[in-house]
Image: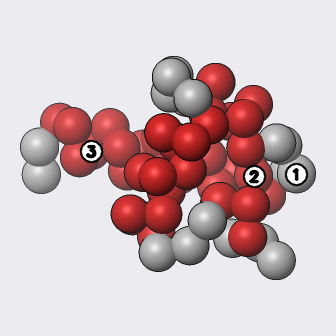
């Protein structure tokens, strides 16, 4: 596993915890260092095949 992929997976684990606590997607994206909420959402969708705002609903 490359460092880039490992870092992305670690970020997803962190994001899932924050999203489970009802934190807004934009806030999670900012805290994980993404340039925008849409960039974070695109990565999330590519990785998990679902939008972050719909993951827990």
Residue lying farthest to the left in this orientation: 2
Image quarter where the C terminus lies is bottom right
Foreground residue among 29 and 42: 42
Q: Earlier in the sequence, mark 3 or mark 2?
A: 3
Q: CA distance from mark 3 to mark 2?
A: 20 Å
Residue 29 at least partly seen? yes
Q: Earlier in the sequence, mark 3 or mark 1?
A: 3
Q: CA distance from mark 3 to mark 1?
A: 25 Å
Image quadrant assignment for residue 36 = top right
At 84% from the left edge and 43% from the top edge, which residue is drawn? 23
Relative to 20, is 14 above or below? above
At 88% from the left edge and 51% from the top edge, which residue is drawn? 22
Residue lying farthest to the front in this orientation: 38
**Residue under label 1:** 22
* Marks 2,1: beta carbons within 8 A: yes
* Marks 3,1: beta carbons within 8 A: no
**Residue under label 3:** 6
Label 2 element class? helix
At 42% from the left edge and 44% from the top edge, which residue is drawn? 10
Q: Residues within 10 Å of mark 3 (few under 14, many from 20)?
A: few
- Specify the color scheme: secondary structure
Label 3 element class? helix
At 46% from the left edge and 52% from the top edge, which residue is drawn? 42
Q: Picture coordinates of residue 52 (x, y %)?
A: 65, 59
Mark seen at residue 19: 2
Tally the numbered discs.
3
Mark seen at residue 1: none
Mark 3 or 2, which is nearer the eye? 2
Foreground residue among 10 and 31: 31
């Amino acid at each position: 596993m490359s460092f880039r992929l490992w870092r992305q997976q670690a970020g997803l684990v962190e994001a899932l915890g924050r999203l489970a606590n009802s934190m807004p997607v934009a806030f999670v994206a900012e805290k994980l260092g993404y340039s925008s909420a849409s960039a974070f959402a695109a990565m999330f969708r590519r990785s998990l095949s679902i939008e972050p705002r719909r993951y827990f609903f």
